[in-house]
Image (tube, helix red, strand yellow):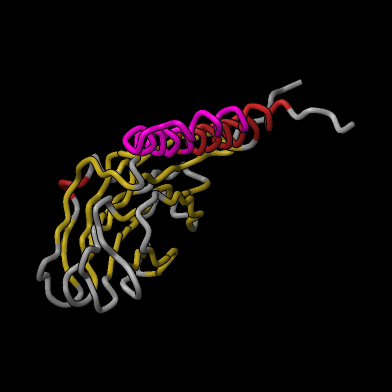
Amino acid sequence: MDPIDPRQETIDAILRRIRDLSEQSLTQLSQYISYLKWQEELWHSLLDQEEESSSEWRLAWQYDFLEHFPEATLEATRTPDLMEVKVGPATCGMVQQNALWQHPPVVGSGVCEYQLQVPPHIERLRLRFAVGIRDGALMEDDNLCAFRVHVNGVRVWSTTKQSNEWERFTVDLPNLAGQEAVVQFMTDGLGDARWNWAVWGEPQLLGYVREEPLSS
């Protein structure tokens, strides 16, 4: 006889109870599952950072783009018609976090540009953020939104997105210690900007220094 899997028993018991729920309760359950999934992803991310920090690298500097939004420059590559850029809470996949809202213009890309100075002692630079399409957007078929990040005029990351759920990314950047960095967050409707409720979740620039080994 095969051994009983306690995890599977728990899942089966939960499924039996779910079948008796009303539609309203099922909706609430779906929202709570999304919240738990987000919490697990955040926890694993924090564990990874703690492991990295405690072994070879230590977080020594942090730049919060939402906090410095009043210093940002907003522009469009062509015309700014219907472009909207601001900071505020955003809900994607029923999970809310603070975000940079960046609905692209009808034609071309919207650009949110930051100019900042990287401290001279930084040895490793990473950009951490999430991207999402706010809940309620009715994007379908070939309606996609492009997200791009440029640093000092070079594209360092890009993706296209249609689904609402947050997607989290960490991008290693070139060593810019002691230099000025121009960071541009860009969104583009790719010819169809309808429902492009694009948001960047809690974007941050993280600077690390190498951890000194303990003396024996």
154 left or right of 198 in image = right
Q: Quadrant of the C terminus?
A: top right
What secondary structure characterizes most of the magenta part?
helix
- Give 93 or 172, whichever is nearer the viewer: 93
Q: Is residue 32 magenta?
A: yes
Closer to the camera, 141 or 190? 141
Q: What percent of the width, then of the height, locates residue 87? A: 19, 45
* Residue 42 x, y percent position in the rendering: 47, 36
- Exactly how many numbered labels are in the figure? 0
Residue at 32% across / 68% down in the picture? 140
Q: Is residue 177 left or right of residue 48?
A: left
Q: Nearer the viewer, residue 62 or 1?
A: 1
Q: Is residue 123 left or right of residue 152?
A: right
Relative to 151, does residue 42 appear above or below in the rendering? Answer: above
**Image quadrant where one finds the N terminus:** top right
Residue 84 falls in image quadrant: bottom left
Q: Residue at x 47, y 49 (%)?
A: 126
Residue 178, percent from left and from top: 40, 50
> Is residue 214 within the magenta segment?
no
Q: Which residues are magenta?
A: 12-37
Viewer-side residue, 215 vs 87: 87
Q: Residue furthest left?
A: 81
